[in-house]
Image: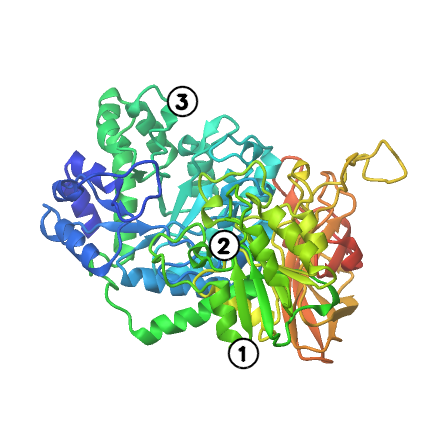
Amino acid sequence: MSRIEQLIGAMTLGEKLGQLTMTAAPYAVTGPFVAGDISAGIKSGAIGNLLNLYGPDTVAKTQHLAVEETRLGIPLLIGLDVIHGHRTLFPVPLGEAAAFDPALWAATAHAAAREAAADGVHLTFAPMCDVCRDPRWGRIVEGPGEDPFVGAAIAAAKVAGFQGSNLEGIAACAKHFAAYGAVTAGREYASTDISARTLQEVHLPAFAAAVAAGVATIMPAFTELGGVPMTAHKELLTDYLRGELGFEGVIISDYNAIAELMHHGVAADLAEAAALALQAGIDIDMMAGAYGSGLPIALERGLVSLAQVDAAVRRVLILKERLGLFKDPYRGVGVEAAEIVAQRRVLARAAAAKSAVLLKNDGGVLPLAKPRRIALIGPLGDAAEEMRGAWAAAAPMTGCVSVVEGLRAALPDTKIDHAKGVTIDGGDTIGIAEAVTLCDGADAIILCVGEAANMSGEAASRAHPHLPGLQQALCDAVFAAAGTRPVITLLFSGRPLIVPALAEKSAALLAAWFPGSEAGNAIADLITGKVSPSGRTPISWPRATGQIPVFFGERNGGRPFNAADHYTSKYLDSENTPLFVFGHGLSYGRFVFSNLRLSAATLTEKGALTVQVDVANDGARAAEETIFLFSHDKVAQVTRPLLELKGFGKIALEPGARGAVSLTLRGTDLRFPGPRLTPWFEPGEVEICVGTAADRTRLLTATITLVAQ
């Protein structure tokens, strides 16, 4: 008999339920309440898993309680939100998505996992796989943006980076299953009600990719989907995840989500809530106390069986065994060498630079050519703590590099004057006049504006995702004072902001997101031309709130936009198109695409072909370009999006250099859920579109014919 089966056979019911219970330690607050003293619960076997605990000494002492002072000596599983770094912070996930670089995505996850493991963490609640097309939603900052192909690519890369090839890293958790990013009106915790087709085409692919990559755990969303709370959604958690996808890992509830089944109105008491969750497939109850208090009653009522409890316990113990916790409960814990920490900062700097998106650069105002004096104006210019982003659970409040610090380090011979002008979201304009005086005699004027870090993330939806507070008034005053001199704007946010006036008046506009620990140094690298910008928007930027959701994968409809026809799809007071399309981004090079060619004119379902395009850098600086491969099925039994992303690649070229990008397109890539929502490969013509963004005017197009096998 295996160790796991021996343990299950030896456990009391209370000890079994302890293995299905995850309790929060008070080292980070990620929910509406925290537990008190947890020592007694650990020693009694009532708590088998913890979250929000880290630090070598603290973890060792706490783990000692479980291993040495309990009857069975089962080690604790310790989880933490390692979302975009641990102590060293990388760009927020939406920002890092803009890099369109799977190797970078995996590298930052690997670095964060190594750092977290040294702090005693075994499990991260990442990656967040929620595709979202509504920038009002605060948690958009944690996800991949608007596209399911990108979501799947990030999910696979992050799982590999966090876990390694055989869980030698830390366990990953794909969350929040499923369609959390489609909450009503972008309002956090609201209900979701979407079609089965949208669920399959948009919201499930990233989770399927995570499972295929071997993700160890999955977390359901707080929300309901079509009237069924995900915490109790047996059809999706058991039938789809475990049945169709073959997921064998652990399913962990979100914070207090099982108890919240009573608020949803599907459970009358905690026992019913616990029974619904266990029957649906939830293995670990996070912070609801539902399994410990409710399952004994549910067993007495016959709502669940002991075999169901044992199955969940078995999955939890298998995970602990796979992580090596029985062999070494203190695995990886220790103080890292200084050179390892320094190398991580180098990676953080590169990641921040690769993630920034140059949205506009009129007249080649960037990069700057060593100005004598810079006027740096705005509340984000000297705000190192805001650079941390929305999920910095273990990162110290100090240690991030501010913009002014980075620029002063990069330009020691340049005088850099800074003034806030206004606070991020305050209502006082008294500082604007003084700030504007800095423009006098300045060779370069840089605005640093945007959101505070806590304006995105969980419980941070915004009905008006514009510049907060009186920052627009500050910007207007600076533009007026600048006159004909160009103004460079650095924009910090956890979502696309609605900034048409800022985009119009800025000569250069750089979306920096929240760049992390090396923010100021990375921005200085971009401003001075040490690094050419290469980020591309992973989500469309709206012109107006009324456009939301706006995304490139929409369908044509029966009356598509026609400026000459009143009775077609359009607004009376706005353009249909976004301010910045998906994939938009500039560099310091000038790339030209030509000679799109396909290796075959036809494609079968099991076949593949190569798509190639020539690329030339006709600019004066070395740069990197991202190439997107889209498809459009012209005629099908089910209407198809105007563009569907099927691949992307990168090419770096010196000035005057030429090269080619090759991408593989498989027949299976062109399948879609058919009339009965089963995989469907439909013969006929398909457009293949290649270019720099989801904009038909910037794409080269060819046509292939899909043929039956």
Tell me the element at label 2. helix
Q: Which of 576 and 526 is in front in this view?
A: 526
Q: Earlier in the sequence, mark 3 or mark 1?
A: 3
Q: Is residue 466 above or below residue 194?
A: below
From the top left corner, tell me how far across and down residue 597 is, in percent.
77, 67
Q: Mark 3 points at which residue?
A: 266
* Mark 1 Cα shell of 10 Å, populated few (<14), some (14-19), many (≥20): few
Q: Name the residue under label 2.
A: 93
Q: Which colour scheme is used?
A: rainbow
From the top left corner, tell me how far across and down residue 276 is, in percent.
36, 28
The image quadrant of residue 673 is: top right
Tell me the element at label 1. loop
The image quadrant of residue 304 is: top left
Q: Which of marks 3 and 2 is nearer the N terminus?
A: 2
Q: Disc 3 marks which amino acid?
A: Val
Q: Which of 151 and 674 is in front in this view?
A: 151
Name the mark on residue 413.
1
Tell whether 634 sits left or right of 184. right
